[in-house]
Structures are given as C-alpha cells and as structure tokens.
Image (spheres, rainbow, N blue to C red):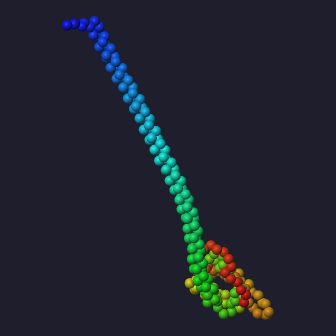
Amino acid sequence: MTIRINLLDWRAERRRQRKQRFLAILGLAAAGSLAVVVIGYVAMDAAVSHQQARNQYLTQQIAELDKQIKEIQELEKVKQNLLARMRVIEQLQQSRSATVHFFDEVINTLPDGVYLTSVKQSGQNVTIDGVAESNGRISSYLKNLDGSPWFKDPKLVVIKTSDKSKLRSSEFELQVTNLTKASSDGSDGVVGSGAP
C-alpha cells in the first residue's frame, strides 16, 4: 500500500479554484450584460422603427385630412355662392310683386288733372315729377299718397306755376317713402319715367 502525501498547500489550491470560479462568474456576468445591451439595443431600434412608421402613417393621414379640409372649404364657398344667388332670386321674386304694387298704387292714388313726367327711386326714397292743372290737385295727390298703405311721408319739394299755351299748370316735384321695397335693399335706380 502506498501513501500519497500532498505537499501542495491546500489553501493555495482553494484560492486558485475560487479565482477560476470568480473569473467564470465575471465572464458570465459580462456575457449576460452584453446580451442585455444587445437585446436592449435591438428592442430600442425596433421601438424607434415602429414609432417612425406610426409617425409616417399619421403624417399621411394628416395630409389626407388637409386635402379633405380644403375640399370642404371649397364646398363651403360654393354653398355660400349658391345661398347668395338664392337670396338674390328670392329678392327678385319679391320685388316683382313689389314693383307691380308700386306702379298700381302710383296710378290708384293719382287724381284727375295730374300727370306724371318721371318717377325715380333710390333705395326706398321715390322722387315723383309731374304736372297738375291746379295746386289743389297736387294737394289731393299728397293726401292720397299719405293714405296709401304702400307709401309714407309724402313731401312736396318744388312747385312751379307756368302759363304755357294760355293754360295755367303747376309743375311739381315730391318725395315719398316706398314701403313695398325691403329696407335692406340698397339698390339705386330709376323705377320708371314717362311723359303725359
């Protein structure tokens, strides 16, 4: 039988084993850390790529919405133009009957012996020029205009007496407010003119 005697120091051997274990653990930790860093980098790159894709999608959607908004604005302009045209047509329809009432009332209020030479309208103000056989007939005309539901505030502006061809006549100009025209209508123009 042989006896083996270990002459090596058992403490040195244990130190060497511990050092190897420490280096192995350190290597594993470094490899694990490197793996975590690589996985983190890959995950972060994937997250950035995903967010960039989402941002690009949002940018495309915003561009499409901007196009739709422009189309809506164009449609709104078209709508406003159509509504404005409809209002003009409605006003024209209303003014057709108002014009008929206006001339009908001008004739109905005209007494015998009074002839009109011109009728001008600017907004709601109407200027009427004419010739009457006497001043009393002009006064009757003013009373008739004042009593009409289509006119108000008749005012005599000018009256001139002339003796043409040995007939005495009075030329007059009067102003009256036309109630057949809407007050919002600011159009100026000559309603009509004529001579006796």
The x and y percentages for residue 60 are: 52, 52
135 left or right of 74 in image: right
Q: Which residue is drawn at 62% across and 73% down?
A: 186
Nearer-the-camera pick, 8 or 85 = 8
Examine the image and state in which quarter residue 156 appears: bottom right
**Image vertical order of residue 18 relative to residue 53, above or below:** above
Q: Residue at x 45, y 41 (%)?
A: 46
Nearer-the-camera pick, 111 or 106 = 106
174 left or right of 81 in image: right
Q: Which residue is drawn at 79% across and 93% down?
A: 166
Examine the image and state in which quarter residue 81 appears: bottom right
The x and y percentages for residue 9 are: 29, 8
**Image vertical order of residue 62 relative to residue 183, above or below:** above
Q: Can residue 179 be seen in this view?
A: no
Q: Can residue 88 be seen in this view?
A: yes
Quadrant showing the N terminus: top left
Nearer-the-camera pick, 99 or 138 = 99
